[in-house]
Amino acid sequence: MATILIVDDSASMRQMVEFTLKEAGHQVMVAEDGLAALNLAKGAASDLVITDVNMPNMDGITLIRELRALPAYKFTPILTLTTESTTDKKMEGKGAGATGWIVKPFNPEKLLATVNKVLG
Amino acid sequence: MAIDIGQFVQTFFEESLEGLDIMEAGLLALPPGAADLEQINTIFRAAHSIKGGSGTFGFKEVTDFTHVMETLLDKMREGQLAVTGEAVNSLLESVDCLREMLMAVRQNTDIDNARVGDLQGRLTQLLERKGAASGTADATGHRGPVASQPLPPAGGWLIGFRPHLDLMHRGNDPVRIFRELAALGDLTVRPDFSRLPRLAEMQPEDCYLAWELELRGDAGHEAVTEVFAWVEDDCDLSIEALVETIVPPATGKTAAEEPGQGELLLERRGGDRRKSDRRGSGAAADGGSIRVGIDKVDAVINLVGELVTTQSMLSALGVDFDMDRIDKLHEALDQLDRNTRDLQEHVMRIRMLPVSSVFSRFPRMVHDISEKLGKRVELQISGEQTEIDKTVIEKIGDPLIHLVRNSLDHGIEPPGERGTKPQTGIITLNAYHKSGSIFIEVGDDGRGLDRDALRRKGLDSGLLRPGEEYSDEQIHELIFHPGLSTAKQISDVSGRGVGMDVVRRNIQDVGGNIQIASQPGRGSMITICLPLTLAILDGQLVSVGQDCYIIPLLSIVESVQIRAEAINRMAGKCEVLRFRGQHLPILRLYELFGAEDAVTDLEKGLLVVVEADGRQVGLFVDDLQGQQQVSIKSLEKNFRRVSGVAGATILGDGRVGLILDISGLIRVNNAAM
């Protein structure tokens, strides 16, 4: 199964996403902000990155930019977690190199459907 | 796969309440006028997280309310809305309101909709006043379909898909898109090679191909657009109804059904799931949970590892044990002893939380109340990282609030009455560890206790005898007596019937004590002394007849043998011992507890001098036994409350020993006199 990097500063979100993806048989790496995620990413490649946008230390947009600069992450699908109200954030994410987005609120089924869509 | 997200609700509540604390602290620190971008960002982030989480867990009211707050904060962040005192106050009230909403959702009680509506209205007004409401970020976020109008449903779609060269640079893959389209109907893919350069000029990372896609089936326009949502800016896209197909009327329903299904889903999300979530969260809330740093858990795991090693060492010794190896056995037992002690200490530490969780509510309270009273007050907090047992933390909140309110209301003078002191009064909150206890100090530089007024009250109520001299401590002590308030008028802030006696009782309930020091015109300092933990106590075992009692080691001053000539019998039946220049009341424990076969001759037993609440008494016992740590079992839970007894414990030999409550004993003794 795939290795997925989850980045979110909210513990409940992290737990939910991690649990859902692990239940589906994926390997999961977890980081609580962009900086931690970047450090993880430098040490290990992953098949998919799912990141929150609003985070302390390093936000999701900066993280995406930094990830795209890493050879191992040049073509890795990166999805942002965003609320519906922040349409411009979706675009900002895309501008930084995000593949797509998952709109909050989402449920585990929707998350898995999107992940499967990306991973094929 | 069905996943119950209810199990994460508890975490959501915890992090949301923490988020609210962050918002509150941030708002209080926000200087009006000058927008501190970093600060607003932090507040915004907290609101944003709560909104995201509440949406996921189906708490729609919370999502809606947070959304308005978030929009307002976003405007502030963008500089479109000024940071006014009014806006900050409204947001602070919203934080309170949100906290109540979360509690209501957590406990499955009703949300105060009137209050929510009122605040929401005020926030919206703030937004509208600045004309910021137009074109809010409120829009549902659906980017319009590529074709500006939804096309009539058709028997299929003809899609022109011409990716920009860099489409794959963002992790998108045309094959994924084809796969998704194929799931919607019957897909035919016709590649267009016209852009393909010569091999030598080809960049392997670029996408030169384009496609014409024919999708047959009853998929709606929206469903097709959705597939391209992530790439619509990375390609030239056209989606047209397949003209050559006759549109069967039946498929006309499809598009109409689409939003219908969406609504159904939404409704389900708002209805059923929320109910089940609430049930789940309610049950989880009852258990209570605690956040523990990983280092603490690791330390325990480490120690358990050592314990296992010791255990296997002992097991090995147990096989064919002979007396030659007695030294080894002692060594292993010593190690076991050490492991147990360390493990106990570290496990207790898991229950310890920094006192900041209590202190953090005070900046807001001081801000609000000082404004209301028209006083200028600065709150200085220190030692907020000091850790205290979770149970104790929960119990000291209310007493501390009362003390700080008192300082604000009665202690700090209004501006103009502070004489030579700085016009801004100072209230200090300090916490620290000292000799196995936790101390919390609440101080102010206000007017101090009115000694004369207290003395008069004491005389009036018969607590003091006329003509006698009393020390400051004895006079100050009077404020802890029920019904003795010197406040000349009852104010909204304090003096509402909950007196210092209740504060003292609350503190004593968690095994602590409270003292006050005060200087007229200079201020007061109240010191609360709390035990490190409620579960374990360092005790001195004493024997009285056949029974064994435990005296908390911390309250013991010393133990002495008595000479008969040093004893005075006072009027009534009270005995006192002349001891180090003072008269010490003697309490014969065997009398108090009706113990048989006890030593009754004062010269043959021992007197343990104990101190609580600044007063000393001598407890007469047969003899001292060992000192040991005892785990406290509640007497109330298993029997009933007994004054003078703090709890019970099971001793090494299996007997039950009662743990003495020294302040309680002193009160019992006073009442007897």
Image (cartoon, grey):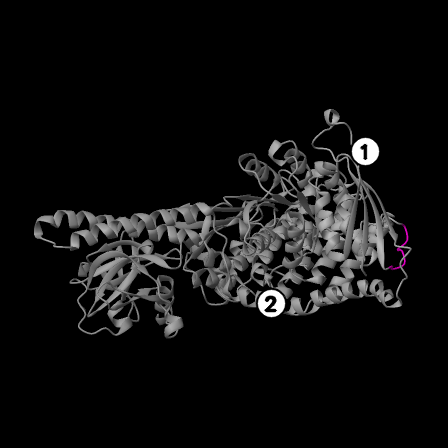
* In-front residue for pair B657/B390: B390
Whole-percent x and y of residue B367?
66, 49
Q: Residue at x 68, y 53 (%)?
A: B52
Camera-near label (1 vs 2) is: 1
Task: Name the element at disc 1.
Answer: loop
Query: Which chain's residue wears label 1?
Result: B
The range drawn in magenta is: B148-154
Task: Name the element at disc 2.
Answer: loop
Amino acid marked by disc 2? Gln
Q: CA distance from mark 1 to mark 2?
A: 63 Å
* In-front residue for pair B207/B308: B207
| Quarter of the image where one finds residue B121 | bottom right
Q: Residue at x 9, y 53 (%)?
A: B322
Q: Which residue is mark 1?
A: B195
Which secondary structure type mostly characterizes the magenta part of the structure?
loop
Whole-percent x and y of residue B397?
53, 57
* In-front residue for pair A66/B669: A66
Q: Which residue is mark 2?
A: B107
Identity of the residue furthest to the top in this view:
B200
User: Is residue B103 among what the camera can see?
Assistant: yes
User: Is residue B455 among what the camera can see?
Assistant: no
Whole-percent x and y of residue A23?
55, 56
